[in-house]
Image: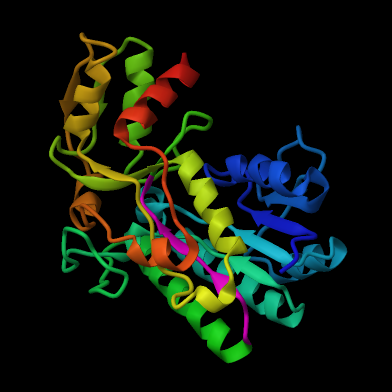
Amino acid sequence: MTFEKILVTGAAGQIGSELVPFLSDHFGSSRVIPSDVRPNTNDPRFISLDVTDKGAVEKAIDKYRIDTIFHLAAILSANGEKNPELAFKVNVVGLYNIFEVAVSNKIGLVMTPSSIGVFGPDTPKENVPIETITRPVTMYGVTKLLAETLGYYYHSRFGLNARGLRFPGLISYKNPPGGGTTDYSIEMIVEAVKGRSYKCFLREDSKLPMMYMPDALDSLLRLAEADDSRLKHRTDFNVTSFSITPKELEMELREYYPSFRVTYQPDFRQAIADSWPASLDSSAAINEWGFHPRYDLKSTTADMIAHLK
């Protein structure tokens, strides 16, 4: 598999803004074309691209001779509930356009990250496998579940090399949260470093799977470069590094900031968190493409604080 010209959609988002330099370091900056509806004028490679405009996607892929796509453009869970119509348009129509153009242009690989948002209240809570009950209760979750299924369809129907993984909550110090239900984790660490208290929008016992951004980026690359013959799954790999509650993160932060305090005032995001599992079974990712997270809660917190300082 070659990675001569890589298009990254949603490159100004939480994952995309870190994936672009990560891929540039790995493959060379000249091979990476970052794109978003919000262009980054500080990067001369950046192009303006609305994935809901199929013609614009076609032109970009043709102009830059794209052979690989990391499709990250999406509206996340909390923001998706505020604007379900936009979430459907970006997450479903945008992906459909990417797949259609990828097939017609014989694109070698399309990476389409999914999310724990595909799970719902009927999903088991602990050590959830890939194949399980998936009845999401958010528009974001509905669109991501459709995206997973669509990836399988395009692979079986057209031979498209579509791959993806279900990200848990992602923690990063480089960019502000992107409108997700697990954003409390980033916000809490930032407020602790600033010497302020924090009002958490989830209950203190809301246990959810999480991952530090360096592990997320490494996972995307490992799956992209994996031998296709080893893959029994395609677009729905579970990945996770650790599971925590807001209270556990608070107590970890108090190791550094003893006076740090959190108050808990759940809002509409609590219902979303309650519909998601507390832990995931990542064995398929481990066995099929060597998933290997390096960060746990302690090392994530330590690294976040070191960089935020």
**Residue 94 visible in image:** yes
Instruction: Answer with the quarter of the image where residue 50 lies.
Output: bottom right
Residue 54 as seen in the image, left or right of residue 169: right
Q: Nearer the viewer, residue 229 or 8?
A: 229
Residue 254 belongs to the span the image colors magenta:
no
Q: Position of residue 13 (x, y in %)?
A: 56, 44
Q: Nearer the viewer, residue 33 or 253?
A: 253
Looking at this rendering, what residue extends furthest in the right direction? 63
Q: Position of residue 114 (x, y in %)?
A: 44, 62
Q: Nearer the viewer, residue 82 or 244?
A: 244
Image quarter in which the N terminus is found: bottom right
Instruction: Answer with the quarter of the image where residue 61 lies.
Output: bottom right
Residue 167 belongs to the span the image colors magenta:
yes
Instruction: Answer with the quarter of the image where residue 142 lies.
Output: bottom left
Residue at left offset 32%, top offset 70%: 130
Report the number of numbered marks: 0
Q: Is residue 305 above or below residue 150?
A: above
Q: Position of residue 24 (x, y in %)?
A: 72, 44
Residue 295 as seen in the image, left or right of residue 9: left
Q: Position of residue 137 (x, y in %)?
A: 26, 64
Magenta-highlighted residues: 159-169
